[in-house]
Amino acid sequence: MADQLLEQARDVVDGQIDFEGQKLAESLATALLGVVGGIAFLVGFFLQDIALALKIGLGGTALAFLLIVPPWPFFNRHPVKWLPVGGEPATTSAQQNIVIDEKLFAK
């Protein structure tokens, strides 16, 4: 029973993210943390309240964490198409001729 619960938790947490999704996540994190940091600084400066600035900064960091860390489906819009695993050659219609040290090998 515990194994089933652990497996379900792994399925929820273990997600795929493609290269374009990684780029989007990095851009989103940089922009969001920069904007939240700027807002926290300005609010803290004008109100002269460091505690409020820290709360805004920590809240923005938590929001960025929730938006970026889970493998949301929009991070996997361009999945990578990998080559087939063994067995099937890349070219099936034509026979390949390989020349090594002036000797012809047919594959």
Image (cartoon, helix red, strand yellow):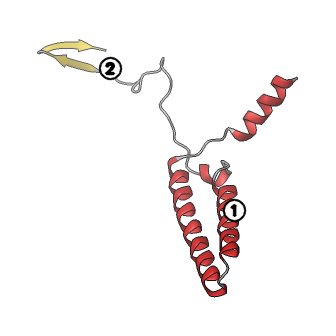
**Could you tell me which residue is drawn at 62 percent across and 87 percent down?**
46
Specify the amino acid type for callout 1: Leu
- Rendered image quadrant of residue 105: top left
Residue type at mark 2 is Gln
Q: Under tag 2, what secondary structure?
A: loop
Q: Which residue is tagged 1? A: 63
> Which residue is the site of mark 2?
95
Using the image, determine if residue 62 lies above or below residue 70. below
Q: Residue at x 54, y 70 (%)?
A: 34
Where residue 99 appears, as percent x and y from the top left, is 18, 18
Earlier in the chain: of badge 1 and badge 2, it is: 1
Residues 14 and 59: in front is 59
Q: Are marks 1 and 2 in contact (CB under 8 Å)?
A: no
- Quadrant the C terminus occupies: top left
Q: Which mark is residue 11?
A: none
**Residue drawn at 42 percent across, 22 percent down:** 89
> In terms of image quadrants, where is residue 8?
top right
Q: Of the residues tagged 1 and 2, which is closer to the observer?
A: 1
Looking at the rendered structure, the secondary structure element under dot 1 is helix
